[in-house]
Image: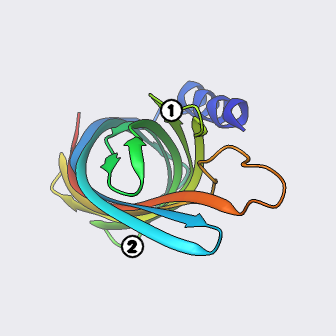
């Protein structure tokens, strides 16, 4: 999956000359849900994200938006660990007028410091909205639903699962 996503990003960057690039940053509200033998524990934290994006025209209102972002998340309650990751979403963006756009697409997360019992790879689905404020600035909100179990296989008959999800609210600047 990593190779397919990286290949798609490279093709989009290489073939499309009508592109715009930018930077984004904001606050992340991240939740981790641990299901352990039927018991459910949820931890919530606030942190930050920063990253870069490209916007490539596929039509008048249709665009592709690859990104690379650093997202911070460190838990120290029942769920413990450093879940900082590089996230690489590939979003389809649809314009709803001149200023508003909705976006959705797959996202790959690569953990920077995985523990021995945690996976280093996270797959998710991103959805969100962006509002342009003039030619250069934008504000956006996005939800990421992690669909991968972040724990290694605990063994036969052991039902243990850790999933990450979160809301990001921030601003961007187009170069």
Q: What colouring does the structure picture have?
A: rainbow
Q: Nearer the viewer, residue 158 or 120?
A: 158
Q: Quadrant where the N terminus lies? A: top right
Mark number, residue 103: none
* Relative side of 28 to 114, left or right: left
Q: Residue 53's image quarter?
A: top left
- Please tell me which residue is depicted at 65% across the width and 60% down the height of the picture: 160
Q: Decide which of tag 2 and tag 1 comes sooner along the chain.
A: 2
Q: Looking at the picture, does residue 55 appear above or below residue 30? A: above
Specify few, some or many for label 2: CA neighbours under 10 Å numbering under 14, 14-19, or 20 or more. few
Q: Residue furthest right?
A: 156
Q: Which residue is mark 1?
A: 114
Task: Return the x and y of residue 163 as percentages of the image width and height.
Answer: 54, 59
Q: Which residue sits at x=53%, y=55%?
A: 59
Foreground: 4 or 92? 4
The answer to whether 14 is drawn above or below residue 130 in the figure is above
What's the residue at 73%, 47% (across, down)? 153
Per the image, label 2 sits on a secondary structure element best described as loop
Instruction: Point out the image quarter for the C terminus.
Output: top left
Label 1: which secondary element: loop
Contact between labelled residues 1 and 2, with CB atoms less than 8 Å apart: no
Residue for badge 2: 96
Horizontal side of 11 relative to 63 (left or right) equals right
């Amino acid at each position: 999956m990593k190779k397919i996503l990286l290949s798609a990003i490279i093709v989009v960057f290489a073939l499309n000359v009508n592109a715009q690039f930018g930077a984004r940053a904001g606050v992340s509200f991240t939740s981790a849900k641990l299901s352990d033998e039927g018991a459910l524990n949820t931890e919530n934290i606030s942190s930050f994200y920063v990253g870069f994006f490209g916007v490539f025209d596929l039509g008048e209102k249709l665009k592709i938006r690859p990104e690379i972002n650093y997202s911070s998340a460190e838990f120290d309650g029942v769920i413990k660990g450093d879940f900082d990751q590089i996230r690489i979403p590939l979003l389809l963006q649809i314009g709803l007028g001149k200023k508003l756009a909705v976006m959705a697409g797959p996202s790959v997360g690569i953990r920077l410091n995985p523990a021995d019992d945690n996976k280093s790879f996270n797959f998710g689905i991103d959805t969100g909205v962006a509002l342009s404020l003039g030619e250069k600035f934008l504000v956006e909100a996005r939800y990421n639903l992690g669909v991968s179990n972040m724990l290694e296989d605990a063994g036969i008959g052991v039902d243990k699962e850790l999933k990450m999800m979160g809301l990001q609210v921030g601003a961007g600047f187009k170069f």
